[in-house]
Image (cartoon, rainbow, N blue to C red):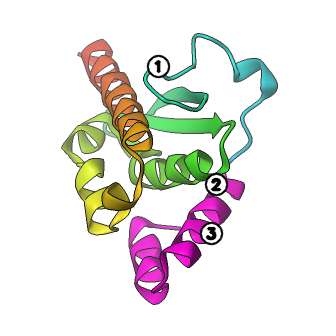
Amino acid sequence: MTIDDIRDNFTLLEEWDDRYRYVIELGRMLEPLPEAEHSAKNKVNGCASQVWLVRKAARNSSGDPVLHFVGDSDAHIVRGLIAILLTLYSDKTAQDILNTDALKVFEELGLREHLTPQRSNGVRAMVERIRRDASESLAAAS
């Protein structure tokens, strides 16, 4: 699934209740996070719910760092928000991650105005964590 698929599906769903159910369904499709990865090291601070993100790095044929993320949360809607973020960021180069504005995408989808301030803060915290991981990977590659 791509972010364009998610955009198209949001367009088809006119009611926000249907869109919330869709976001929750996206969360159900997340790659499972092993229980051992639900650790303090992987926990994202700044989220009202518990959120864990794990970064796995590799290199593409050009030697650029490519990051794969796996995430989880104890809240269904947050798992869906993680799924949207990972659609944007996972398996991308670190530079592509830094060039992608997830908050703008959330605005385009209308999610920012329909999330509580706490959830919006959590999304920002997840984006900051992913961007920091990308910056660290770029610095380590230099």
**In the figure, residue 80 lies in which quadrant?**
bottom right
Q: Decide if residue 60 is in sight here.
A: no
* Mark 3 secondary-structure assignment: helix
Q: Along the horizontal axis of the image, is 98 left or right of 45?
A: left
* Mark 1 secondary-structure assignment: loop
Q: Does residue 114 sit above or below 82 in this rendering?
A: below
Confirm or deny contact between disc 3 and disc 2 (CB under 8 A).
Answer: no
For disc 2, the marked residue is 27
Name which residue lies at 42% across and 37% down: 118
Residue 109 vs residue 6, the one in the foreground = 109
Name the residue at the right extreme: 35
Looking at the rendered image, the quarter that the C terminus falls into is top left
Lower sequence index among marks 3 and 2: 3
Residue 138 vs residue 62, the one in the foreground = 138
- Amino acid type indicated by mark 2: Gly
* Mark 2 secondary-structure assignment: helix
For disc 3, the marked residue is 21
Image coordinates for residue 70, horizontal then vertical, percent: 60, 37
Name which residue lies at 50% across and 51% down: 81
**In the figure, residue 123 lies in which quadrant?**
top left
| Magenta run includes residue 17 | yes
For disc 1, the marked residue is 45
CA gap, disc 2 and disc 1? 20 Å
Q: Along the horizontal axis of the image, is 101 left or right of 56?
A: left
Residue 141 vs residue 44, the one in the foreground = 44
**In the figure, residue 96 lies in which quadrant?**
top left
Name which residue lies at 66% across and 42% down: 75
Q: Does residue 49 sit above or below 25 in this rendering?
A: above
Residue range in magenta is 1-30
Lower sequence index among marks 1 and 3: 3
Lower sequence index among marks 2 and 1: 2
